[in-house]
Amino acid sequence: MSIVTKSSYINNILTGSKKIHSIFFDHSTFFDHESKLMLRELEVKRNNREVKELDRVLSDLNTLNQKKIPDIEKLLNDQLSVFGEKVKLANQQAHENLSEAKKLFENRTKRNKERKKQFRKASREIENDFKKKILLIQKKEQERKKKAELKKKSKDKNQSKKENKSKITSEKEPEKKIKEQEKKNGNENDNEKEKKEEKKEEKNEDKKEDKKEDKEEKKIEQKEDQKKDDQLKSEKNENQDEQENEKITKKESVSTEEK
């Protein structure tokens, strides 16, 4: 007998007992005291039967619940195990993402330190090269001033010599003047030759100095080009670091969402 049939049976019993009770006890004038007692005994028996039936129904329900409880517990345990595995996987993924982020951050800090060192070295080299250029320019100016002063002194000496010779010739006889004039012409020719030789030497010295200056300027320009290349490389590395930072932020956001 199923639970539904048992419950309907109990309801029928209860309704029947109520009907009997209404019939006999509403018309109590037709029966005597003994009949009333008999009816009460019958009612008590029926109530006992109903109680027994109710106990059976309750026992059946308890048995069914006891059978269903382990199934429910199994489902709950399975769900808890699945949820625990998901949590473990999420924690592992988050830990891996954090470790990768730490490695990338450490590499980035190392690169930044190296770049700072390179930048400082390049700036020092630029300053030193600039100072060297200034010193070269100052040396050239000093040398030119010295040469100009030497030229002026040589011109003054020659001029004084000529004046002294002219005085001497004016005091001497005309024959001597003629000889001296010839000598002067020879001396003038010699002076002109000396001047030409001096000019050649000065030109050669100027050429040598210009060559040295050109070499030094080329070296400085090469260093500047190298520094520019280093700066471009550093900028490229900075762009790579920015991309790595974006990757790190994305991984961290993914790990937080998974949590």
Image (tube, helix red, strand yellow):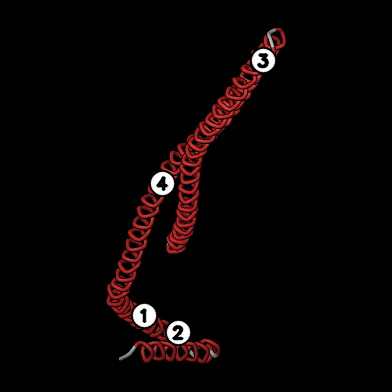
Q: Residue at x 38, y 89 (%)?
A: 4
The x, y position of residue 15, in whole percent, is: 47, 90
Q: Mark 2 or mark 1: which is in front?
A: 1
Q: Looking at the picture, which amino acid does disc 4 mark?
A: Arg
Q: Looking at the picture, which amino acid does disc 3 mark?
A: Lys
Callout 1: few (<14), some (14-19), or many (20+) C-alpha neighbours within 10 Å? some
Q: Looking at the picture, which amino acid does disc 2 mark?
A: Lys
Label 4 element class: helix
Q: Residue at x 61, y 19 (%)?
A: 154
Label 1 element class: helix
Question: Nearest the camera: 136 or 160?
Answer: 160
Report whether residue 104 is seen.
yes
Disc assigned to residue 36 = 2
Confirm or deny contact between disc 2 and disc 1 (CB under 8 A). Answer: no
The residue that disc 1 covers is 54
The x, y position of residue 90, in whole percent, is: 37, 62
Residue closest to the far front? 175
* Lower position in the chain sequence, tag 1 or tag 4: 1
The x, y position of residue 222, in whole percent, is: 46, 46
Q: CA distance from mark 2 to mark 4?
A: 108 Å
Disc assigned to residue 177 = 3
Q: Mark 3 or mark 4: which is in front?
A: 3
Q: Mark 1 or mark 3: which is in front?
A: 3
Q: CA distance from mark 1 to mark 3?
A: 171 Å
Q: CA distance from mark 1 to mark 4?
A: 83 Å
* Lower position in the chain sequence, tag 1 or tag 3: 1
Residue 51 lies left or right of residue 201; in this view the side is left
Q: Mark 1 or mark 4: which is in front?
A: 4
Question: Nearest the camera: 220 or 83?
Answer: 220
Figure check: 104 above or below 187: below
The residue that disc 4 covers is 111
Q: Quadrant of residue 244?
A: bottom left
